[in-house]
Every structure is written in C-alpha cells, then in structure tokens.
Image: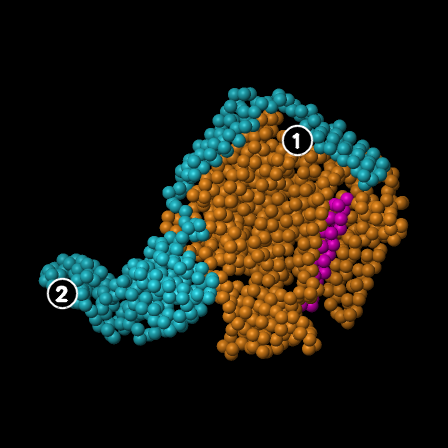
Chain colours: A cyan, B orange
Amino acid sequence: MSLWLLMTILCSATAVVISIPLIRRYEASVSHAQGKEIYEDQLKEVDRDLEAGAIDTNEASAARKEIERRLAAVTTQVSTPVSSGWKLFALACAAGLVILGGVNLYAYMGAPEIPSTPQLATAPATNESNQVESMVAKLKTRLAANPKDAEGWRMLGWASFNLQKYDESAEAYRKAVELDAANIDYKSAYAEALVQAAQGTVTPKAQTILTQVLAKDPKNSRARYYDATAREQAGDQAGALDKWIALLADTPADAGWRENVTQRVAALGKATGRDVSAAIAAAPAASSGTDNSQAAMIAGMISKLAARLETSPKDQQGWAMYVRALTVTGDVKGAEAALKKALEIFKDDKTAIDSFTTLAKGLNIKGP
Amino acid sequence: MIAEFGHFALLLALMTSLVQATLPLYGAHRHDRSLMALASYAGVTSFVLVAIAFGSLTYSFAMSDFSVRLVAANSQLAKPFVYKLTGVWANHEGSMLLWVLILVTFAAAIAIFGVNLPSALKARVLAIQGMISSAFLAFVIFTSNPFLRLANPPADGNGMNPLLQDPGLAVHPPTLYVGYVGFSVAFAFAVAALIDGKVDAAWARWVRPWVLLAWCFLTMGITLGSFWAYYVLGWGGWWFWDPVENVSLMPWLAGTALLHSALVVERRHALVGWTILLSILTFSLSLIGTFVVRSGVLTSVHSFAEDPARGFFILMILVAATGGGLLLYALRIPVVRAGVPFARASRESSLLINNALLVVAAATVFVGTFYPLFIDLIGKDKISIGPPFYNRTFVPMFVPLLLLMVLGPFLKWKRDDIAPALRKLVWPSVAALAILAVVWAMNGGTMFLTACGLGLSAWIVLGSIWLIIKRTKLGAVPFAQSWQVMRSTPRAYYGLVLAHLGMGLVVGAITGVTAWQSENILSMRVGDTTQIAGYTIQLKDVSKHQGPNYDAERGAFTISESGHRVAEMSAERRFYPLQRMQTNQTGIRTNLISNIYIALGDADSQGGWTVRIYYHPLAPWLWIGGFVMALGGFVSLSDRRLRVGAPKRSTTFAGLTPALAMKVD
C-alpha cells in the first residue's frame, strides 16, 4: 500500500472520529444523576461491605449517614446546550484543524521522497560511500584491538579522507606516521589531510612535513603540489609559478591532478605576465613516475591485505574487508574467489559463514 | 515509509490535542454534552495517533532504518536486538515521545474508564490534559522531532551511549516517566476543580489512585535508578545527590505528601485547598525534573541533550503550567475551600505535619540543587553542594518525619488523644530502644548515631507490623478471631503497612552502609590476594574477550573466607570502539545481607590492574526496601473500596474518645 493511501486513510479516520460527538444527537438535558452517581455507588458499596462482614452495622450506618449528607449537598447542574449553528462551527474548527493543520504541517516537515533503508529487511545499501563508511567502522574496531597497525591507520586515514572527514583522516595518518616515521607516503598523505582539514590552507605544521618529504623524495608529486600551493598562499606568485611549471613537466598526461596544475600555471602566468604557453603545451608523453591516484591506493591496500591474510588467514574481518574492497574496485570475480577461500577457511564456524552469506548478499555477489 | 507514516500520525496528534484542549472547556462551561464528549473522543484519538507514531519509531529502530536521523545517530547494526528497542527511549527525542505517549495513555484511560465522573469535570480534566499534551507534542515536533530523515543514510549508525546499554536502562526511564506523568493527572484534576469551583467526592475518589499510581512508579524508578548507578558507574555509590537524582526525589517527596493529603480529602473532605496546591506543585516539580534533564542546565551523565532552544521551550511550559496553576489557585481557592474541621490530635493533624515536613524536605533539596546554578547565573562563582549540605539540612528534617510516621496510623480520624496512641506503641518503642542500646554497646559506646539510625529503622519496621498486631488483637483474642479480622482488613491497610515497612528497611540500610562499608582500592597482579571485611579476594586471571559491539577485559576473582572458597566473581571493563568509551560491568555478590562489590580498573605499567573492592553491609535492603514501598503502593491501589472516613460510634479500642466523634455532623 502506498504511503499516500495510508496517510489519507489515517487523516480521514481521525477527522471522522473527532466529528462523531458533534454530529451525534444527545438528549437535550443532562441526566439528573450527574454528580450523584458516585455517591450512589458508594451507598451500594456500604451494603456490600456490610454483607461481606467487612464492617459492622454501626460503621455501616455511620458511613451511610455521611454519604447521604454529601449526596444531599449535590446540586444538579442545569445544561444550556449550544445552538446547532455553534455546533457546526465547532465541527468545522475541529475537522478543519485536523485535516488542514495535519496536512500542511506534514507538507512543511515531512520528507516522503526519502526512501527507507531498513538494514534488517533488505540488504545494506551498496553505494560506494556506504561501503567506505562500513569499512571505516570495521577498521576502527580492528585498530582498537591492534593499535600498532600502521597500514591499518593509513587505510583509515584514506577512507576518512574520502568521506571528507579530514580531521579524522589527519589523526589517523598522524598515528601511521608515528608508527612508521620513514614512510614517505604516510607523511605526504598526512600533510594533505592537514591541508584539507584547514580548508585548503597549508598550515605551518603541514609545511614542515612537506619539507621533510621533499628532502627525502624531491620528486614526490603530492608534496610538490602542496608545496607550490603554500608558496602561492604566501603571496610569492613568481616562486609558485616556477614550482608549478616544474611539477607540470613531471606530471603524466593521465594524472588526475594535471588539470589543476595546468590551471594554476595559466592563472599565475597571466598574473605575473609571463608566457607559459610552452610549459603547458609540453606534456610528457606517457604516464610514468609516482602515481598517487586513488585506484592505486586501493590496489596497494588490497595487495597488503592479501599478503596479511596469506600469513594469518584466521581473520574473519580481514576477509570481509578484502572481499568488500575487491567489489569496490569492480573485481567481482576476484571477490567471489576470495569469498570462496574465506568460506573454506571458516567452514567450521557457523556464525562466520552466516556473516559471509549476508555480506555476499549485500554486495550482490555469488555467495555460498 | 513507516517513519513518514509515524511522523504524519504525530502531527495529527498535535491537532487532535489542540481540539481536546479548547472546545471541551467551552462545552463544560455551557454544559453541552456533545462538546464535552468531544474531549473523550479527541483524547482517545490522540492516544491512538501517538501510539502509531511511537510504534513507527520502534519499528525504525528495530529494522535499523538509518534513513531516520535519530536511528543513525543512536543505533548501530552490531547491537543486541533488545538494545535496539530500548534505544528508542535512550535518547532525547525518543524519550520525549515516550513521555507524550504515557501522557496521552493516561488521558485515554480517563476518557474510557471515567464513566462515573461528572461530565463537566471529566471534560475539564481532559482539556487540561490536552493542553499539556499539545505543549509537549509541539515541543517534540518543533525542537526534538524524532522523525527527521537523512537523504544519504550511512551504512551503519553511531551507536548508543554504552553506559545506557544495560537492562536497567530498559525499564528505568519508562517507570520514572510513568511517575512524572502520572502527577499530570492530579494537576489536571486540581486545575479542573479550580475552574469548576468545587471539589466533590468524585474528585477525591479519582485523584488518589492516580497519585498513588504515579507515586508507585516514581518509587520504583528512583530505586532502579539508584541500583543502576550502583552497578554501572563502578564507584560503589548508590546515591550521589546528583542534580538528576535530586529532581526525581523532589516530586517524590511532594508526591508522598500529596498521597497522604489526598487520603485526607477522600476520607474526610478536609485539607482540600492544600491538596490542590500540592497537586500543582508536584507536577511542577515533575516538569522541573524533565526540564533539568532535557536542557542540560545542570551537567551530569544524564543530560544527553544540551540544547538551549529545547530547555527554553520546556521552561516556558513549566512557567505556563506552574504560573497558570498558581494564579488560578489564588483566584479561585476562596470559592473552592470547604474544609471540615478536625482536632489538633487526630489522624488529619499527623498527616498535615507529615505534609509540612515532606514539603520542607523537598524545598531543601530544591535549594541544594538550584543554588549552585543561581550562583553561577549571577556570575559569582562556581560552587557545588554535596552530601554535607544534605546531611545537615535534609536529614534533620526527615528524622522527625520518620519518628512520626509510626504514630500517625495509630491516631483516629477527626480527634484523638496522643497519650493513648503512644501507649499502644510501648512495645515497639521498647524494642527499638533495646536495639539502639545493643548496637551502641556492641561498638563500645561509639557510633551513637549509627545506633540511633538502626533503632529508628527498627521503630518503623516494628511499629508498622505492630499496626496489624494491634488491629487483629493477635495474642489477646483467639487466633480464629484475629484471622477473621485479618481477612476483612482492607488491602489498603496492608498497603500502608508495607509502604511504611519498606521505608524502615531503607533507613536501616542507609545507616548500615554509611557506617560500616569498607573499601579497598589497590593495584593487583594476577595471583595477588587482598583482604576485605574478613574475606580474602584473589585476582585469578584477567582475560580478553569480545562482545557484539565492544571488547572487554574480564577479571576473575576468587572469594574465600577463612580458607574456604565462598564464590567466584568476575568484573569487566568494556571498551566500545565506535564511541571510544569505557564502561564497567561490576561484579556484585550478595547474600541479601551484604554485598561484595568489585570493579576492574585500568592496567598499570607494572603489569597490575587497579581494582576497587567494596564491602557494603545491609546495602541490598536499600533496593529491597524501595521495592517493598512500591509494592505497598500497588497493594493499596488494588483496593478500590469505599473510603468514607466516617467516625465510628463504637471504637475498637475501648475507652478512647467515644461519643465525641459524632458531634460535628
């Protein structure tokens, strides 16, 4: 049944029930016993108690006397019913308020266009950001158990970065750097997260890290990119342009950030009045050098994961993540193969099999 | 879709509540039956609609529908199913919806079962209830809407505060809310009586059971809350004078007063004005409780909503209800007041003294709770008021009350003499004094206050039991005759005995725990042993294990007494990675006389763990006493018999004020 139909039924039913007393005919006057009923009930109770032996005759007569005294004091209320015109007005008010008020308020506050995503009734949503989010949750659990896992922190940093949670990302990368200070990739990624967390400003902290990276690996594209950005933000347009041009010369044609760099070169060329057309035209022939694109990141992550599972295969969460990651890259065949392997390893663990089955269902791949 | 349907039902409920709050008032004024009947129809409809809304929200939680923002923010997939359900009210929005659900349930109950209520009174009561529910529905819809949706739902939710993932929390808030909200019925009846200008028998007959019901649930709620704090927080305390605890204690104190004064109204038609005033004040204190917890003005573990807009909204409801109620009281009470006189020494007087003491005690707690806030507000300083304040103010107020609560039931309605009543209590007083003396002597003449506390406890417990013995003349007449009286004694009488007895148990437990508890906080390595209260406790092992949504470190302890192993205990420290929070699963071993309480703390650098061990003598009776009190209330509630406090010509105990009693009639 559609939502609209249900809502119409609910709204009409409410209006009808509210209208009943205003449409129904009541006898003109209020019954004489109004307000006396309770005393009459009480008198009956006295008789009942007396019969049951709960009170003796003395108590009963005393109680009766008291009740009758109160009964006598009751004044009968005279009813002055409202006119039928007034009733009609009340009806219009009540029903109108319910229907118009309810519908208008819903039009203002409701969100019927958003689909429900009950996680028990149907499979988990399969869009990419959801995948990443559930991966983050899993990673966090794993890292809590084993906080010395630098690669795990890096993965968390990468995933948080993609979810645009830059603060969390920077924090995760910081831990990775702490655990493995020599790793250039960790450091450059840490700097990038710091810059994004500061809304694109290269902070002094980020600059220090960038300098460290460039000291070790002067060709690191990511570090060079933010280094140039920093120079530009510092107001040194000419110096920044030099760096941008140098970076552009080393940037492969198919690199994701090439367009950005080209733009910066063109803009700064215009601003400083330098002719940069040659630099822009001279594109390197083939993609080479360091490639820090996301696809490569995922690939790196997957291979690391695979290696780890090779050495310690009894890692249910690791397998689940591995299968998920493979699906994200579009490698359904690989994912299915991995799942099969995992099922083989956990063939004696019923809960694990169940969870893999749900996972397979959720990822829309062939399960057991 | 279900969530949207629930949202729509909630919006419709606001509309029907508005109808319920307005038109029937005019109907009652004109005595027009159709407009008065409208109150009942609207009341029941509001109930059905809010129930649909609450059901939809529960469904969304059960199904983990993360497109509902509240579910995404407070639930997670890897959470035991039962906590998905209790998660509905373990957050601000859901708990307010539960509040409203209870409110409209009570209104619907009055609408359906109030057949012998005069129709004008009924219409007015329901209209007042309608005003309260309109205000709270508007609050829920406009400041705390539980049905807001997310266009991009996350794959998993943020999870629930781990402290709240506990069976105690499944029942604590609902019982507390039934208590708070139950007092709204008394409030509605009070305001209706003020509008009506009279208090009749139907009024009294209806108010008392509702007050009693609310009181029972509030008693249970406070008891559960105290127990929850005891075993979850891991500090071995059972009452912290924390603002959130205080704001539930205040309506309890006022409600206890109201309960006793409503009794006087029902039986004797006296203290009418005072009862109306108390009804207004008790509900105001309930609203203050809601306000404090919901607004987070006083920071504490419970204030998960720290939003000024919400606090302001509830403050406005509070001001309107209290201000409006008191204004109406000032204007109309001269019309209503129709007191029946009673003598200075009488059941009525003793209940009035009880009322005065309870209200002053509530005021003390009020000052203690809000004075720091006031000081903070005028920018002077940040101060905190702790147990020493309450020990010096609340306790002296409560002790005479406890002494008197035994005497009161021995007094007769209307007029009596103190001396004969006291004479009936000779044996309980002797026994209580004996206990006092023995305890004092056993401690070598020290700990006089502890001895007094235990003597007081004995006085209340024995005095309450003595009521039954005296009434049935047990021992003085043949047993068969006593049995006959025992059987014909109204259940409400047993309710009284139980409730008072429960209080006595609580007093004893508080005394025992305060005086004799011992604690031992130390660092233990596996294999280490320590001593507490004659027990030897060994840390046998610490192991890691994995829960559905947490990791835990579990310490296994062996308890032995003089070489014999008594028990195995375990205490856990849980870490919830999603929320980055730690909770305690304390180990408690009770033999119903005392508790051994173990909490496992952090590991230290020397390979040991911080372990907190407490020995709490008499502690179990704190909560047993609380539940006995509530049980007394329920027993009394089950007795819906006539209550006319008609003075008796022939008295049970010969020689006491016989003929005098009928003079006033």
Q: Residues within 10 Å of mark 1 (few under 14, many from 20)?
A: some
| Percent position of residue B608, x then y | 53, 76
Can you tell which quarter of the image residue B124 is in?
top right
**Image check: A129 left or right of B385?**
left
Number of the label disc, if any, that sits on residue B118: 1
| Residue A174 visible here | no
Mark 1–mark 2 distance (CA, rounded to whole Å): 95 Å
Q: The magenta stretch spans which residues?
A: B490-517
Residue at which label 2 appears: A285
Q: Nearer the viewer, mark 1 or mark 2?
A: 2
Mark 2 belongs to chain? A
User: Which type of secondary structure does the marked residue at label 2 adopt?
Assistant: loop
| Percent position of residue B96, x then y | 52, 47
Q: Nearer the viewer, residue B614 or A327?
A: A327
Mark 1 belongs to chain? B
**Image check: A263 left or right of A299?**
left
User: Which type of secondary structure does the marked residue at label 1 adopt?
Assistant: loop
Quadrant in the picture for the N terminus of chain B: top left
